[in-house]
Amino acid sequence: MNGDLGEKETRFLEKARQSLLASEDRLDAATLSRLREARAKALEAADEHNRGFFRIPNWMRVGAFATAAAAVMVFAIWVDPPKPELPVKSLDEFEMVLYADNLDIYEDMDFYEWLAEAGNNGGSA
């Protein structure tokens, strides 16, 4: 069936071609001249459109933009300025920061120091 459809299309195209060629012969010179001028203008406009932006296809421009954007992102992430270190004055402060969930102990530090001293003195206060 596909072979028949191809044959039908071929015959149709051939008849259309012959009909157009026959109608071209019947056109007067002024109409043919206007048609040729219109064709020349259309080809010139298409050529000017293709000359823009160094004749780079749209897909290539999009790819170049995506590559440049990715390079900027990588550069911005990679060349991140170093963060200054937080100064820790003593080991006690470091332990407080490290064990932040036990801050209740540090709030009652006086009590725990008194308790330790009382324990060292034999439990008598």
Image (cartoon, rainbow, N blue to C red):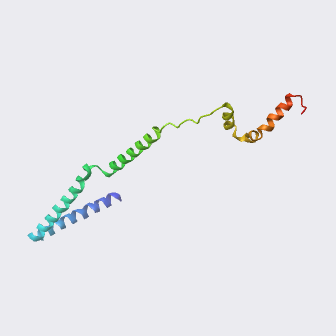
Residue 108 vs 119, above or below: the answer is below
Q: Is residue 15 left or right of residue 101?
A: left
Residue 17 in percent (x, y) is at: 20, 64
- Where, quadrant-wise, is the N terminus in this rendering? bottom left
Q: How many marks?
A: 0
In the picture as drawn, the residue positioned furthest to the right comes out as 124
The answer to whether 6 is drawn above or below residue 29 in the figure is above
Residue 113 picture location, percent across and down: 79, 34
**Rendering quarter of residue 25:** bottom left
Residue found 24% across the figure and 54% down from its top: 50
Q: Is residue 28 left or right of residue 78?
A: left
Task: Classify the position of the C terminus by image quarter.
Answer: top right
> Does residue 29 sit above or below 118 in this rendering?
below
In the image, is 22 to the left or to the right of 7? left
Report the residue that reaches farthest toward the front: 125
The foreground one among 29 and 7 is 29
Q: What percent of the width, then of the height, locates residue 121? A: 87, 28
Q: Classify residue 68 by image quadrant.
A: top left
Q: Position of residue 96 (x, y in %)?
A: 69, 37
